[in-house]
Image: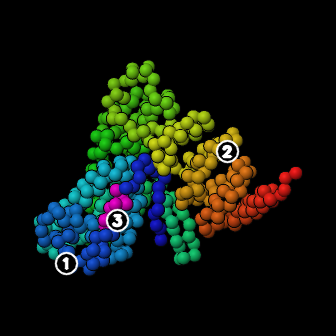
């Protein structure tokens, strides 16, 4: 069993709308009888009529707890990726637009070309539409999954969004091919994906989303719809407007920017700071990386930085003995549910104990480590706890000894 819980895609905005949509789905499920929605059929997608209201309301109705929970888990995953690029207001409009389109292509053909029997409900059609948007906007980013195999083997795994999308498309397509072309759950899922594709392309074409050159078309070397790019960048490279200035603002000399750059919409400050920080870390420019990381924190954009980049930054600071600055990325890593969090806790404890002489902080961070621990991590933790407790006892003895 695979359960998605996160992504390494840059998240420039907190998933306010995604959480609100999940809460709305849950509330409606409880208020409408927890799947026993006989009195609320007017809210589901009925195939014996054309009702635009149902195109939206049906996506907030679910038939069972498993139906609801499964959909909400994947809504969280893909919503995090897409809302992270758009912000809550634009994501909300996109979600409603996808729901409207998905409901229309599900209800209208059934009313016109069948006997109109049956209906549909659930957010899965919109979620498959979001999957299509995610694979076009961020195909090379990963989705973090927690896996369980026979209740004996468990852990985490990272799978590229493009692989996830291909897998689900193949599964749904094969089911439709096996059962024939008729209205069914797999068919509704494929219709949802087909609804998401034009939305994703339209928003890219009209610069309504900034994918920083990592979208499907840019990464595959396709010039995107004839849109202009900043001079000096190849068509398949991410656009970087800050490459010549790090995290600084434009100088007066920059007024000679080419017309193609001037016509581009203003970029998200998080995107610019993120690119500059990533470049500084890769180039091992420590001072520039520190400045850019401060800019990320100032704009509340650290959530956009992947774990691997934070690890590289922390290691870079370790080589130059910048322990105070190193604590910041380590604390962000420790707060995340990833494979790096426990090691980050160990590193924080070492800094607090050996460099800050604060054994109490070291003990607190060690006690808050996430279980289960590997044998190596557990042994290191025990050693650090012994050293921290010994240092605490030394401090207590020193405070109680008489002076003179």
Q: Depth check: 400 or 61 in front?
A: 400
Q: Give the quarter of the image for residue 373.
A: bottom right
Structural distance between the alpha carbons of marks 1 and 3: 22 Å
| Residue at 19% from the left image edge and 78% from the top image edge | 39
Secondary element type, mark 3: helix
Q: Are marks 1 and 2 in contact (CB under 8 Å)?
A: no
Q: Residues within 10 Å of mark 3 (few under 14, many from 20)?
A: few
Q: Is residue 311 above or below residue 279?
A: below
| Residue at 48% from the left image edge and 42% from the top image edge | 298
Structural distance between the alpha carbons of marks 2 and 3: 41 Å
Q: Which residue is under mark 1?
A: 39
| Disc number placed over residue 279 in the picture, else none | none
| Disc number placed over residue 23 in the picture, else none | 3
Q: Is residue 127 visible?
A: no
For the view shown, which residue lies furthest in the right direction? 404
Q: Earlier in the sequence, mark 1 or mark 2?
A: 1
Q: Is residue 20 magenta?
A: yes
Residue 306 on image: x %, y %: 52, 50
Q: Earlier in the sequence, mark 1 or mark 3?
A: 3
Q: Is residue 119 above or below residue 18?
A: below
State which region is magenta.
Answer: 17-25
Structural distance between the alpha carbons of marks 1 and 2: 63 Å
| Residue at 31% from the left image edge and 43% from the top image edge | 208
Q: Which residue is under mark 2?
A: 323
Q: Give the quarter of the image for residue 97.
A: bottom left
Q: Are marks 2 and 3 in contact (CB under 8 Å)?
A: no
Residue 201 on image: x %, y %: 30, 46
| Residue at 75% from the left image edge and 62% from the top image edge | 389
Q: Residues within 10 Å of mark 2 (few under 14, many from 20)?
A: some
Secondary element type, mark 1: helix
Q: Give the quarter of the image for residue 182.
A: bottom left
Secondary element type, mark 2: helix
């Amino acid at each position: 069993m695979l359960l998605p819980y996160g992504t390494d895609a840059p998240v420039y905005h907190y998933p306010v709308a995604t959480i609100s949509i999940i809460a709305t789905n849950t509330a409606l499920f409880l208020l409408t009888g927890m799947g026993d929605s006989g009195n609320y059929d007017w809210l589901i997608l009925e195939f014996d009529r054309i009702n635009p209201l149902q195109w939206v309301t049906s996506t907030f109705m679910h038939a069972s707890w498993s139906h609801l929970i499964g959909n909400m888990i994947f809504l969280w995953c893909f919503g995090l990726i897409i809302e992270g690029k758009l912000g809550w207001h634009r994501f909300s409009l996109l979600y409603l637009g996808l729901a409207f389109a998905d409901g229309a292509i599900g209800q209208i053909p059934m009313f016109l070309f069948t006997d109109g029997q049956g209906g549909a409900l659930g957010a899965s059609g919109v979620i498959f539409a979001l999957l299509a948007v995610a694979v076009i906007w961020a195909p090379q980013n990963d989705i973090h999954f927690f896996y369980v195999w026979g209740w004996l083997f468990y852990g985490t795994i990272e799978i590229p969004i493009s692989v996830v999308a291909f897998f689900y498309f193949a599964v749904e397509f094969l089911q439709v091919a096996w059962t024939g072309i008729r209205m069914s759950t797999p068919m509704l899922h494929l219709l949802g994906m087909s609804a998401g594709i034009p939305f994703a392309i339209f928003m890219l074409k009209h610069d309504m989303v900034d994918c920083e050159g990592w979208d499907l078309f840019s990464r595959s070397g396709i010039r995107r719809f004839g849109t202009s790019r900043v001079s000096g960048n190849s068509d398949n490279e991410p656009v970087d407007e800050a490459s010549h200035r790090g995290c600084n603002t434009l100088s007066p000399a920059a007024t000679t920017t080419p017309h193609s750059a001037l016509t581009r919409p203003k970029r998200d400050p998080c995107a610019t700071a993120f690119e500059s920080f990533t470049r500084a870390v890769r180039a091992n420019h420590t001072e520039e990386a520190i400045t850019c990381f401060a800019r990320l924190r100032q704009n509340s954009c650290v959530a956009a930085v992947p774990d691997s980049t934070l690890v590289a930054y922390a290691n870079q600071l370790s080589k130059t003995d910048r322990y105070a600055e190193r604590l910041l990325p380590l604390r962000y890593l420790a707060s995340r549910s990833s494979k790096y969090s426990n090691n980050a806790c160990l590193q924080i404890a070492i800094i607090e104990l050996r460099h800050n002489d604060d054994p109490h902080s070291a003990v607190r961070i060690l006690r808050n480590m996430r279980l289960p621990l590997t044998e190596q991590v557990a042994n290191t933790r025990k050693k650090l706890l012994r050293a921290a407790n010994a240092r605490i006892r030394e401090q207590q003895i020193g405070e109680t000894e008489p002076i003179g």
